Amino acid sequence: MKATGLNQDLLRAAVEEFPADEFSAARSSAVAKLAGVGFPTVGDEDWKYTNLGLAAEISNGWLKTIIANHGAIAEQSNSEQVAMICQEIDAHWIIIQNGIIASDSLAELDGQAGSGISLSKLEFADKDDADDDAMSLFNVALLRDGLRITARANATTDKPIGILLADSPSSAVTQTRIVIDVGDNAHLRVVEYNLSVDPGRQFTNSVVQANLASGATVDHVRIQNRADDHVGVNKVTVNLDRDASYNHNSFDLGGALTRNDVITKIAGKGAAVNLNGLYLATGTQHIDNHTSILHLVGPSTSEEEYRGILAGSSQCVFNGKVIVSPGADGTDSRQSNHNLLLSDRAEIDTKPELEIYADDVKCAHGATVGQLDETALFYLRTRGLGMDEARKMITRAFAAGTLSTLAVTECQDHLAKVLDQRLDNLIGDGQ
Amino acid sequence: MSTDPNDLESLVNRRYEHGFVTDIESETLPPGLNEDVIRAISARKKEPEFMLDWRLKAYRHWLTLQEPEWAHVHYPQIDYQDISYFSAPKSDDDRPKSLDEVDPKLLETYEKLGIPLHERARLAGVAVDAVFDSVSVATTFKDKLHDAGVIFCPFSEAVIKHPDLVKKYLGSVVPHRDNFFAALNSAVFTDGSFVYIPKGVRCPMELSTYFRINAANTGQFERTLIVAEEGSHVSYLEGCTAPMRDENQLHAAVVELVAMKDAEIKYSTVQNWYPGDENGKGGIYNFVTKRGDCRGDNSRISWTQVETGSAITWKYPSCILRGENSVGEFYSVAVTNNMQQADTGTKMIHIGKNSSSTIVSKGISAGRAQQSYRGLVKVMPQADGARNHTQCDSLLIGKNCGAHTFPYMEVKNPSAKVEHEATTSRISENQLFYCRQRGISEEDAVNMIVNGFCKEVFKELPMEFAVEAQALLNVSLEGAVG
Amino acid sequence: MLEVKNLKASIVGKEILSGLNLSVAAGEVHAIMGPNGSGKSTLAQVIAGQTDYEVTDGSVEFLGKDLLELETEERAREGIFLGFQYPVEIPGVNNAYLLKAAVNAKRKHHGLSEIDAFEFLKLAREKMAMLGMDQSFLNRGVNEGFSGGEKKRNEILQMAMLEPLLAILDETDSGLDIDALKAVANGVNSLRDPERAIVLVTHYQRLLDYIEPDYVHVLSGGRIVRSGDKSLALELEERGYEWVREAANA
């Protein structure tokens, strides 16, 4: 099967149909830059295990529709799911529907989310357009709207800020862009929820950029619970200044194909990055987590743990890269990836990488692929549990382990519930 | 002729001088690679037809390939048309007559390594037929090996005396289309070792080969093939060394191992090709393909390597674990100092049920050297109960070196257990102070700590190699701390 | 044997020792006590030659030689032994190997022939028997995976093997339970010798119940503020370090 590529002519023509707005210049510039690049292919080392053929196919189809409709994007309705999530997770919620911020939610929240916290529409600035990789360019090329969250020095929030990406196949291709600026010693807590409000084929491509000033803290929980036919590419870029800390928890539960890139740059002494992730896959799901932690200076620390449970014919990828730059002495980095394979058709490809150019460092990484602990199973059975029950219990415990590092506890109950539902499916499919 | 025809850069300068030499009877073929050159090599070695066909097939495939660029190494573009691919042994007149004529710095190194005097002379190229230590070993113990039914001879001899065995196994583990360097080697290799251990035979002695790149230059594209029939056992040692030269030299070898049911092959390498000087001038480009095929059930292939030499190393001794319960092992110590670059590791491909593999890699980087571990553990869907454990540690000495780890794990079987652990650290000031407080000099303390770091691998080496390896490590790291 | 005069030393610009005087003769056992941060460990480290500390003034003489001019290993070979508060783990390097290298480095320094593996083992076994230590210690990695007590006993074994003229034992009692403490103390006592001086650096008096010192010094603010005999330690135990501090400030 020949992989489909992005049709650049369609892209150019579609973007020309877009009504003029503040993003016009950025869009054309991105289209031009993308021309020589196109979507990544499995020939690119970073995309070795993930094929974006389907994303390109959906994009080409949608671009044709856009050209036919002269740039108009379909409206979208609210859903019950959105209401439920907003109720279950106590947060200041902002709804972004197919990349467009629901204006009422923004107006309602600005100034209410905490002192020193402001929420606004993104004004596209050059510094926010630093990334030149294909998917970031694609994001800008089709950009219609964006969100900026600014936390002034010392600002905090009483409740987390919730960002709900409520996407629907009514617009088959969606770009979302969020920029977060956090001032000195401010503390921002964010829940980002990736949801499909309707079933059907859709390709979403999101970019989140966070800049953390001295002593700033960002807790970022990302929950991805997309529909079965969904293709999602998500990129999070974080820059950390002195003593800043970034805590990330990601939960990937749904979608046909999901690719996440979390790219963190430690540019100030004493900064800390904590990345935690859980991915649950079954059926023919494909979930690819790429993380990169760049220690430009030391002393600085990073800690990372990703866990995965794979059932059915799913394929998951973990690629964790830690780079210690020359002179980043005093770097302390730990990374691990643990996987449980429940089915003989599932596949895990894991690659924990280290690139180290400084000598005063402590770096350790590890990866395992294995099964449930036999001794634990035996122990539970001697206590009278059936084999299935014992398996479920240990599998759940393995997944629940990732909740112990949860930076935004307001999500705890909701997560426990959805993880439970999802694990029931997996364990059922795995046997 | 006193310049080495294999020196890449000297070839450029020699081009006009010898560019018109076409007579295949001449000592050295002019630089350049084409089908005529390959025919000439094959004719010169009096090879049977099948060998020439095989070489030509490899050459034609090589033409379609690109030189790999994914490794974490940097070097100037190699012009393959500027290399001479065949050179007959030179007349004895050109060799040093005695140790007095050999570069004293090289002799000093041999002394530090504890290599016996007669051996030093041979390594330095004084002796006449020193290219292949194995040839003399084979001669010495010929009767004993013959009685056991073991074949141990130069590859070119095997092609003529045992064509059926060669035909059956050559390229069966590393096909000529495997990769750029393997294809090149298949087209132009000039010699190497051939080992055949018949069914049920335990090779009565350790077989060893000393490869050397120098004026005699047959070691440039050598090819080794070891076949261990059912229930047999062999331990093979390979030592490599090269004299110091200002120019870079290319070494692209292929090693193929075949282990049948219940057979065991232990392959140990101590590689000390010339690494170039402190500024990165000269040194060997060591681009090697080594692979073992555990074809039979319960077979075992074990790679142990101590790599201290070469300007650039590109090498991944691998195991294809086809047989049920087959075992693959990779124990490696790699040292890079000054401007050396190494991208090395292993591949373990699990196909057989309950196959298991162990990887222990110890990398030491000093000076301005860059070193990468690159490994692949692949568990195929049918490999029920496959097991892998990987331990991959890096030790950094000094501020300007780099150590990198690129482990790939691809698992397609739910009953597999794959574990990878890696650490990177440096020799701590506390450890050095502790040793010095006990009266041990800083240099000795570093050697002691480094040897301790490598212990797990050294214990896998045959005794005499282990001693040499330790000495080699100390020599390689000279001046790394200070 | 050891003459420390007006020693001032600092680390990253912060002065820890501020004019310390100490005189130790062969055969004597001195205890140096003091509250946390008083400079006890610094004194031990400076005498051993730890380069993190900068000596800004004063002198240290050992058997008439200027110790500060010597490298760490030279000091060790001259006969100075430091028992570390936190013995370092050196993975993969076995104890026997380190000890043999250390013993021979010292012998070579004194113009003696190196001892061979056989002699070394014999010597090591004798010393271990004397200290009541298990032979398996020799084959284990240096302090690798040792318990706190094992590490401290290993320090005493090294001291026994190296037969120093001056042994400085830095908080050798810290982290030990009573049985381990007794074992270590017995080891030290068995190494008491008219030719050898021992300096015990300790926070608590309890070690001195087992190793009886000839002199007790109290360190505070980087100087010795009070010296006396064994009874000083008991007095300290009773009245606490605050008493010394007040006395020093008075």
Image (cartoon, rainbow, N blue to C red):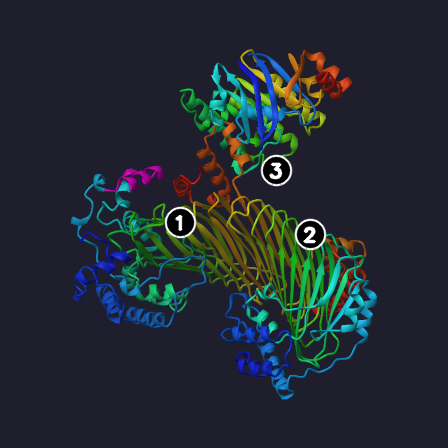
The answer to which of A416 and A299 lies nearer the viewer is A299
Considering every residue shown, the one lying at the far bottom of the view is: A68
At horizontal 50% and vertical 58% (from top left) the residue drawn is: B375
Q: Is residue B399 above or below residue B313?
A: above
Decide if residue A276 is on the left or right side of residue C106: right
Residue C192 in view in this figure: no
Kind of residue at badge 2: Asp
* Residue hosting label 3: C145
- Chain on which label 3 sits: C
- Chain on which label 2 sits: A
The answer to which of B433 and C133 lies nearer the viewer is B433
Label 2 Cα neighbours within 10 Å, binned few <14 / some 14-19 / many ≥20: many
Are the numbered discs 1 and 2 placed on the same chain, yes or no? no
* Residue hosting label 1: B339
How far across and how far down the image is residue B291, in percent? 43, 60
How far across and how far down the image is residue A216, in percent? 69, 52
Q: What span is colored magenta in the figure?
A: B102-117
How far apart are labels 1 and 2 at the CA level?
A: 43 Å
Q: Is residue A95 magenta?
A: no
Quadrant of the image containing the C terminus of chain B: top left
* Residue hosting label 2: A184
Kind of residue at badge 1: Met
